Amino acid sequence: MVKTLPKVDVVTVGVGWTGGIIAAECAKAGLKVIGLERGQERGTEDFSKVHDEYRYAIRYELMQNLAKETITFRNNRKMPALPMRQMGSFLLGEGLGGSGTHWNGQTWRFLPYDFQIKTMTDKKYGPNKLSKDYILQDWGLTYDQLEPYFDKFEKTAGISGEDNNPNWGKRSADYPTPPMKKTQILKKFESATSKLGYHPFMMPSANLSEFYTNPDGAQITACQYCGFCERFGCEYGAKTSPEITVVPTARKTGNFEMKFQANVVEVLKSGNKVTGVRYVDTLSGEEFIQPAEIVVLTSYIFNNTKLLMVSKIGEQYNPDTGKGTLGRNYCYQILPGATGFFDEQYNTFMGAGALGMAIDDFNGDSFDHSNLEFIHGGNISITQTGSRPIATNVAPPDTPTWGAEFKKQSIHNFTRTLSVGAQGASISHKENYLSLDGTYKDAYGIPLLQLTYNFTKQDIALHKFISEKSAEIMKEMGAKTVVGREAIDQYDIVPYQTTHNTGGTVMSLAPEEGVVNNYLQHWNAENLFVVGAGNFAHNGGYNPTGTVGALAYRAAEGIIKYSKSGGSLV
């Protein structure tokens, strides 16, 4: 029997960065908020054993249980889709903080070009730069419109950085804290890229360079450079995450409550509004209905998209006709780069998730694409994240993959290998999309989300270009041997690549072009908001978190406004 609970002003589905920001802002405004999180509660006190690489980085302690819910995958529509049975290409977080707990901390603002990519591309190169198979569209708001929200997120998170990148949009304020330490490795990259005529700068980081108190009174400590960021929680509270910032801010208002082990399986709709959500207690199996004046989907992009599909809210994308927007615009990223082998040794085993230097000379439209087979680019960087012993076994290409020689080369090169890499932008394509699987279901009897995705000609050309540029930088750095990344062809979901999935619930200026408006309010249900990287019309050359955080603050502003007057916000 389903039990109906007392109605609240706002319910969020997921309590990571987006859910935490929505909860904090709405609770401060006096709204009663409940956050439903299907994982467990946790905080810095739970990460006392965080330096266990096997537990967290290999066995994925902080990640989603794929035995209960996963996705199915195929490269194209002619292939059967099969379930992803273990973590691979991307890592899906679960529990308080979500992916905001196990992230590396790179915190970027997408470029002005990203938000108006179709307008700017068409104006400079003409409307036929890419084939019509690509879905190129503006986001429905500009960088300047989003800038105040970028600033707010960075001040909440205390981001450490420096404003000396000529390709960035204008900032209203400096970074809250200075950049991290410029190590020997970073200086080597800085010298090489400067000699090549590029413009290196310190990476904006949520691993803070110094102790910081944010505007809400949350305290974040200084990074210890221990090298355990990605796939780990920070026991020092030095890697900014939701559980040490926005969640405590929401809690101290007295207007926010969290329920854990609460897996939302349906958004309830009546007419042009939603009425609440239905969820299952994953421990007892009991079902509950949580009524709310406003429902906000703040889980990862796959779950946000799936919930709308199973709840029959919005028109699902049809690749045959091109109609529908729900599930469209799925994008990933490419990872071009080069590895260098050196004679001298470097301190590679210490670091932090976002300790790095970068150049944007080949990101966005900062260089001429007239004679190139792609648009956009990627942020090229060197990062010193800490080389952990189990996963770090770099050896020259001609080395056997096991045995005595492999062991010898792996040990020798542990402190003698550096890599330069990029996050390459991904442009939406009509054959890359999300849908519901017709065969497989999750532990609750609901169809799994199906991912249809493959690399495009755009991806392949961009990967080759950026890898060549990375190899030039590595050669200038003095490596005795430079090995460029292997060319890409077919996307493989098995090896880890990046947890930077975007699209599926894209934002737009008009209902026929997207799922939500530029306040992330659903076009078909005025009291439903969908917040996350799913709102991106394409993926850029950066980590998405900073842009997701800015969009969440704008959405929160819209939700508070809607709570007072109702109706469409645009």
Image: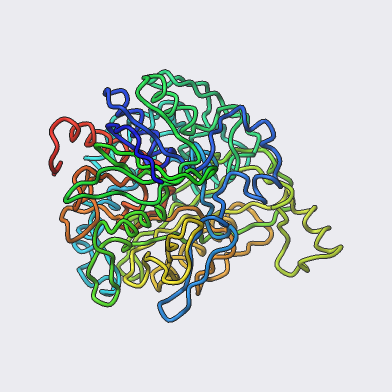
Residue 410 in sight in this render: yes
Where residue 339 appears, as percent x and y from the top left, is 62, 58
Spot the residue most to the front: 1
**Residue drawn at x 30%, y 53% as measured from the top left:** 114
Where residue 122 appears, as percent x and y from the top left, is 20, 64
In the depicted view, which residue is nearer to us: 305 or 514? Answer: 305
**Residue drawn at x 38%, y 55% as measured from the top left:** 502
Residue 260 falls left or right of residue 565 = right
Spot the residue most to the right: 404
In the depicted view, which residue is nearer to us: 460 or 559? Answer: 559
**Residue drawn at x 38%, y 32% as measured from the top left:** 154
Q: In this view, does 57 lie above or below 209?
A: below
Q: Is residue 531 above or below residue 212?
A: below
Marks counted in the figure total 0
Q: In this view, does 31 lie above or below 149?
A: above
For the C terminus, give its image quadrant: top left
Where residue 158 appears, as percent x and y from the top left, is 44, 28
Where residue 366 appears, as percent x and y from the top left, is 33, 54
In the depicted view, which residue is nearer to us: 165 or 405? Answer: 405
In the depicted view, which residue is nearer to us: 298 or 57? Answer: 298
Residue 365 in sight in this render: no
**Residue drawn at x 57%, y 35% as measured from the top left:** 182
Colour scheme in use: rainbow
Spot the residue most to the bottom: 78
Q: Quadrant of residue 315?
A: bottom left
Residue 23 falls left or right of residue 555 = right
